Amino acid sequence: MKASDLLVRCLEAEGVERVFGLPGEELEDLLFSLRASDVEFIPVRHEQGAAFMADVHGRLTGAAGVCLATLGPGATNLITGVADAHLDKSPLVAITGQGGRERLHKESHQALDIVQMFEPVVKWNTQIAEAETVPESVRKAFKLAQYEKPGATHLEFPEDVAAEFVEAVPLPTRPRVHRSDPDQTSLNQAVDLIETAEAPLVLAGNGAVRTPAARRLRELVEHVGMPAVATYMGKGAVSDRLDVSLMTLDSGPDGEAVAAIAEADCVLAVGYDIAEHDPKSWNPDRDKRVIHVDHEPAEVYEHYNPDVELVADISATLRGLRKRLDIETASAWYQDLRERIVADVSREPEPDDPFTVKRTLPYLRAAMADEDVLISDVGSHKMAIARHFRTYEPNTCIISNGLASMGIAVPGGVAAALAIDTNVVVATGDGGFLMNAAEIETATRLGLGFTIIVFTDDDYGLISEKQVSHTGEQFGTELTNPDFQQFAESFGIEGYRPETWGDIESTLERVVSTDELSLVEIRLE
């Protein structure tokens, strides 16, 4: 068979159901091999959108999402989404075409060293230079992408290799590699730190929402009575309905979550990456006893230098801690903070209150079931969602935070609508929305239904907020926008522009639960 046929058979063996990408001349053999397979090829409107779709698919399912682009600009357009997956620990396999090897030793049309270009933003990448290496290359790409900590990998596939005939078969997949149980000495040291602490606290990071870790973490915090705060990417690891939840590191009208972690003398950091949230903000004096629970050792950082590192399977570690801990922490030190946080995020606006993202969130939360998924783009609205949107299940509030890339929301909605059976809502600002709004066409072509909320203020609001806080003025952030209601209707979908809080409540209640694709513009005041 052709090497392109073999590569597609390898994708089938990995369980890949769809590939997001753009066609290209150098991909011709691979595209026709996909047509003859059980793998669905989904043409999108921009390679960045393809990578974001693969990124969100990986975060929601745990299986590597696959994106495809041609050489040159196709490959460079992929890089932002691939880098996002890399820093957010999302399993992703990127495949790029390349010109024939006979012209790569010299300057030629659209030829760039793409393998070298991808090197800083992937766990592993290679050029498939020989057809016989296709099975090993594909198997390695998926194994490393999905192995904890997951991330992105990349395969470059020259067109002359794709056209070669080869006698080979896919390598069989194996069960995922599992980390060992924690060592008993470290486990006992961690237990001693928690039992002797006066105010122990859990910090739930990105790793806490992967695998069965969230269930084990909930069992632990309820058993011990320890309060828990989450990073933006750890939202939902501990349900915000539980009395121990203090939501995220920045929650509360007066920084109550910050106050709690400031008062804590022992922090159990579960699946925490310092790329998620600078530890200097919560351990400025480096005086907290820290227990690091993760699949990899802690990064070297003066404000995050753990007393104990439990480098093992996270779920097994949490189970081991729960079995050994037989204490119940006094709740008085954090319950007042919890009550103020809950009151703040639950307050519905008064009729004459101006439209803000924060005040919209109680209505959005009420319109969504616990298992529905919210995908946030990046901007000032992301900060409000991270701090104030109550999250009840792991992986139901998807936030780009490691790279914090604008433009992820609409492509992410496409991937989510394909990957899961629950309702999907994407929230974006006007800046991030227009970066990849063309993927609405992809969604309509596929017959997908989800809700797009666009918060508009004609500004790159988060940047202008920071400029004003630093200098008292802003520059270079102001925008103009089309009529978003008409923009939505031009794609053949319903567009809404509610004018009152009652309109917002009734509109969200109606559209979130439907199977239709719709857009709701909320004009911020």
Image (cartoon, rainbow, N blue to C red):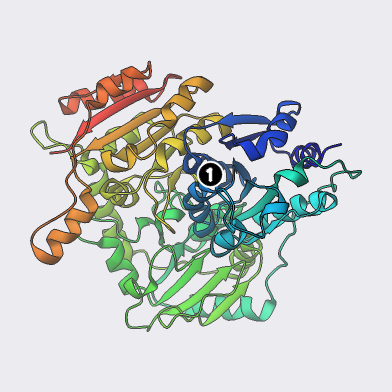
Please give left or right for residue 192 compared with residue 437 in the image. Answer: right
> Which one is nearer the viewer's eye here, 14 or 347?
14
- Name the residue rendered at 17%, 28% in the picture: 501
Please give left or right for residue 489 compared with residue 471 in the image. Answer: right
> Which one is nearer the viewer's eye here, 350 or 234?
234
Residue 494 appears in the picture as rendered: no
> Up-down: is 145 above or below 97?
below
Q: Residue furthest right?
A: 167
> Up-down: is 522 above or below 230?
above
**In which image quadrant can residue 41 be found?**
top right
Residue 519 location, x and y as percent?
A: 33, 26
> Which one is nearer the viewer's eye here, 195 or 65?
65
Q: Which residue is mark 1?
A: 74
Please give left or right for residue 97 compared with residue 347 in the image. Answer: right
Inspect the image, locate mark 1, and give the three-letter code of the amino acid beneath it: Gly
Residue 450 location, x and y as percent?
A: 43, 27
- Name the residue rendered at 23%, 48% in the picture: 460
Residue 469 location, x and y as percent?
A: 14, 62
Please give left or right for residue 166 compared with residue 471 in the image. Answer: right
The C terminus is located in which quarter? top left
> SS at mark 1?
helix
Residue 365 appears in the picture as rendered: yes
Residue 315 location, x and y as percent?
A: 63, 59
The N terminus is located in which quarter? top right
> Up-down: is 56 above or below 139?
above
